[in-house]
Image (cartoon, rainbow, N blue to C red):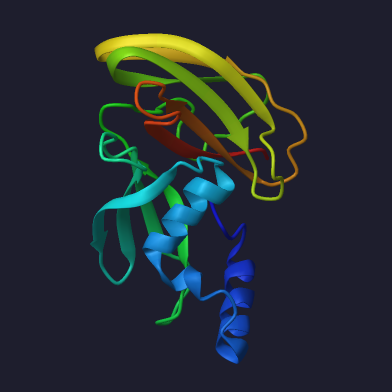
Amino acid sequence: MWPFATLAEAQAWQRDYRSGGHQPWHLDPERTALSFTQGYLGFESIDRITARTVNSSQARIGVAPRGSEGGTAAIIHLVRYGTGPDAPWEVVGTDDTTFTLAMPGYGSLVRSPMQTGGRITGVDESIRVQVRQPSSPKPLGTSCCTSAGGNGQPWKRSVSFSGARDRVLTVVASTGGHVAEVERFAVTAVRTG
């Protein structure tokens, strides 16, 4: 999903790193998770690590908004992309619990408009959905806002998007507004063809 669109890109980074130490943050799952959240998703207020589980091939990194009131916004799931001890970390999704993004399914072939949905536990939630691609700084589409709440209640939202050039897109659903603009989010990867 991010930051490398292909294995060839990850291998090119490995060669650059080996020859000159280029962008060492790709070897740190925490820095990669925060770069994904702040840089790619644009959730700048999410700047804390709340949990860390790392082994040789996978990592799960909890991220949260600044301040002491916000709980974990998401658990970012990363895997090593490629081979060798300097294989970079790649974000592949989120581990969702009280806020899920189940539709469209991971790896689904999609077109615009796209139906999204999942389940949410919370009070007075407002869900925003965006479609992003790594090659663009701005969302390809945004749909806001779906009111939701309760205990494990379903939510649905249609989102239109245009300008997709990358084969893999990121769908991100977020909610917030109580103590931070983004308090929880979930992501999935989809294909354009």
Q: Residue at x 77, y 35 (%)?
A: 163
Query: The C terminus appears in which quarter of the rendering?
Result: top right
Quadrant of residue 187 within the rendered picture: top left
Identify the residue at horizontal 66%, vertical 19% (top origin).
Answer: 113
Q: Where does the image place residue 136, in percent across and percent down from the top left?
A: 71, 45
Residue farthest along the bottom direction in this orientation:
19
Residue 24 coordinates in the image, percent (x, y): 51, 76
Which of 104/66 is in front?
A: 66
* Above or below, 134 relative to 4: above
Q: Is residue 154 above or below residue 68?
A: above
**Image coordinates for residue 95, horizontal then vertical, percent:** 31, 41
Between 50 and 14, which is closer to the camera in this rendering?
Answer: 50
Residue 163 position (above or below residue 56): above
Report the residue at 39% width, 57% height from top: 78
Please provide percent x and percent y for residue 157.
51, 14
Q: Would residue 25 appear left or right of 77 to someone viewing this image? A: right
The reply, left or right, for residue 2 in relation to residue 30 is right
Report the front residue among 94 and 139: 139
Count up the numbered dots: 0
* Residue drawn at the location 48% of the way across and 11% of the way down: 146
Q: Quadrant of residue 110?
A: top right
User: In the image as oriented, which residue stretches furthest toward the front?
Assistant: 67
